[in-house]
Amino acid sequence: MKMLHTHSKILPNRLLRRGLWLEYATLAWNVVGTPVMIAMAIASSSTAMAGFGLDSLIEIFASVVVIWQLKGEDSSNRERIALRLIGAAFYLLAAYVLIQSIWMLANRHHPVQSSLGIAWLALTVVTMVSLAYGKLVTGRALGNIVLRTEARVTMIDAALAAAVLCGVGLNALLGWWWADPLSGLVIVFYGVKEGRAALGHVRDG
């Protein structure tokens, strides 16, 4: 019985370490990627890529919040605060992308082609999908709603990267300048939806 009890403690600890390492990996990727993305956005005058740079900043924020929550002793209180912060981050992302895209369309802003931006966005899609899946599986095994919620943040990061990649690619291949701001609008619906879901968990709890 003692051996069984010890094993039951080892498994959650191992899952917790895995969850933390997934967050560290996400944090490291976005810490490197944010300045890269902002630099390319400035060089190409792409507001979609600038919006994705902001999304990376929010992903950094979300990862820090989850690491803080996973390491806390007062997990119930930290969980509520963490969910509020992640929900607010979703709303901020949706609002920024919406305003930015409308401004670009209204001013008929034509971004410049960015081959490096296309390559980085494609790599980001693959990386974020892999990290999101790992967080979702680990969060379910731990019964940790914050980690599962932040997995959706990471998946939205991948979805935004894919949408921006599509817009930037169409602009580069066909000269469709309007595809750049329209690609940013894809994330607005999901940002609002997931922001409501995160804050809804706080009310239900």
Image (cartoon, rainbow, N blue to C red):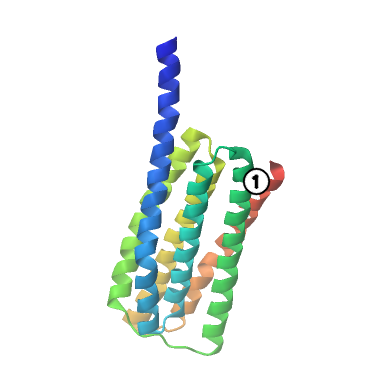
- Residue 148 shows in this picture: no
Quarter of the figure with residue 161: bottom left
Q: Residue furthest right?
A: 203
Observer-nearest of 117 and 32: 32
Task: Identify which residue is drawn at 52% across, 52% down.
Answer: 65
- Residue 9 shows in this picture: yes
Quarter of the figure with residue 6: top left
CA neighbours of label 1 inside 10 A, class few (<14), some (14 to 19), many (20+):
some
Is 145 left or right of 23, judged from the image as shown?
A: right
Where's residue 58, x and y in %? 50, 62
Q: Is residue 17 above or below residue 11?
A: below
Tell me the quarter of the image containing the N terminus: top left
Tell me the quarter of the image containing the C terminus: top right
Give the total of numbered labels.
1
Give the labeled residue for mark 1: 201
Where's residue 147, x and y in %? 50, 45
Observer-nearest of 182 and 118: 118
Task: Identify which residue is drawn at 65% across, 55% down.
Answer: 196
Q: Residue furthest front?
A: 73
Observer-nearest of 125 and 199: 199
Where's residue 185, x and y in %? 53, 71
Task: Identify which residue is drawn at 40% across, 56% down.
Answer: 27
